[in-house]
Amino acid sequence: MKNIDLKVPADRQSLQAFRPDLALISPRSIAHIKGECTVRQLLPGIFHLVMANQRELAQMFLRFQEYSESPFFRGRIFTLGEYKAWYTRVQGQFSYYEDWAGFNIPSRVFAPFYRKEFKYQTRREKMMLDLFQGVEGRFYVIGTYEGDRPETLKHELAHGLFFTSDAYRDEVRRAMFGVPTTKFSRKLAVGYHPAVFEDEIHAYLLTDASYLLHKRELETTLPVMTKLAEIFARYSGIKPSNLVL
């Protein structure tokens, strides 16, 4: 998720306040990573990894995330140096660790890392691989950092539901039918591969519609946003009143 606004209201809600009943996936995992992060299973097949700060989170996720959805590197094997050089050419500087605040990856992206096709794996990449090695079936990992906006967690959880729940994905697609997405796609093309546009549009309409829409467009899109919020609430257990549209 693009870092929309780093100025967070002082009265923001804790990321964990929505689901106080969440359990750690295993004491072994937490001990293994020496307290550098915590991991909880939010919903079946959706794991939430929380790091202490944005920079450490981005360092851990970068190559996994961009192998999944980069407009240039999706599905390609690349080094961290190659990615930094490309990002600098596109953005004018390497500001990735400040630009991106939330992360989401499907379990299939781990395969080439386990096969060691990705060379020069960092300590944090190895930490991620060790943490989820042995988890069976299709699953999804989302990442946020301590003290970030609650909307970041909602945004990433929406991605998780879109991947893990066929019923959720079908309802979202029906709700978005007829929404003109071409202009959204043009904006998303800077940071996302076309394969994930549909998923990203739904997540941004749920939590950060202003990233895609001008104020004058919000009113006409509000019925779709409201429907998406209702669908998300039913599948996530987070009340619609907690959603920021």
Image (spheres, rainbow, N blue to C red):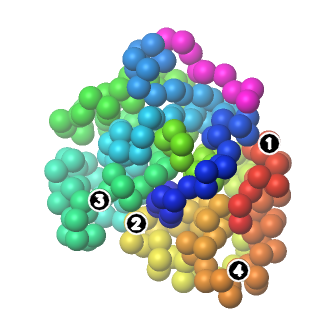
Q: Residues within 10 Å of mark 3 (few under 14, many from 20)?
A: few
Residue type highlighted by circle 1: Gly
| Badge 4 vs badge 1, beta-carbon distance below 8 Å | no
Query: Relative to 107, is 219 on the left or the right?
Result: right
Dot 3 amino acid type: Ser
- Badge 4 is on which residue? 218
Mark 2 or mark 3: whose residue is earlier in sequence: 3
For the stretch drawn in magenta, the main secondary structure is loop
- Among numbered discs 2 and 4, the one appearing first in the sequence: 2
Q: Which residues are magenta?
A: 20-28
50 and 186: which one is in front?
50
Could you tell which of marks 2 and 1 lies nearer the N-terminus?
2
Residues at discs 2 and 4 in contact (Cβ within 8 Å): no
Q: Which residue is mark 1?
A: 237
Looking at the image, which residue is at 55% across and 72% down? 211
Q: Please tell me in which quadrant of the rendered image residue 243 appears.
A: bottom right
Query: Mark 4 or 1 closer to N-term?
Result: 4
Give the residue drawn at x 51%, y 26%.
38
Label 2 belongs to which residue? 191
Q: Residue furthest bottom?
A: 216
Q: CA distance from mark 3 to mark 4?
A: 30 Å
Which quadrant is the C terminus positioned in?
A: bottom right
Whole-number angstrom distance, CA of label 2 to CA of label 4: 23 Å
Q: Residue at x 73, y 74 (%)?
A: 177
Q: How far apart are labels 1 and 3 at the CA level?
A: 35 Å
Tell me which residue sits at (65%, 61%) in the image.
207
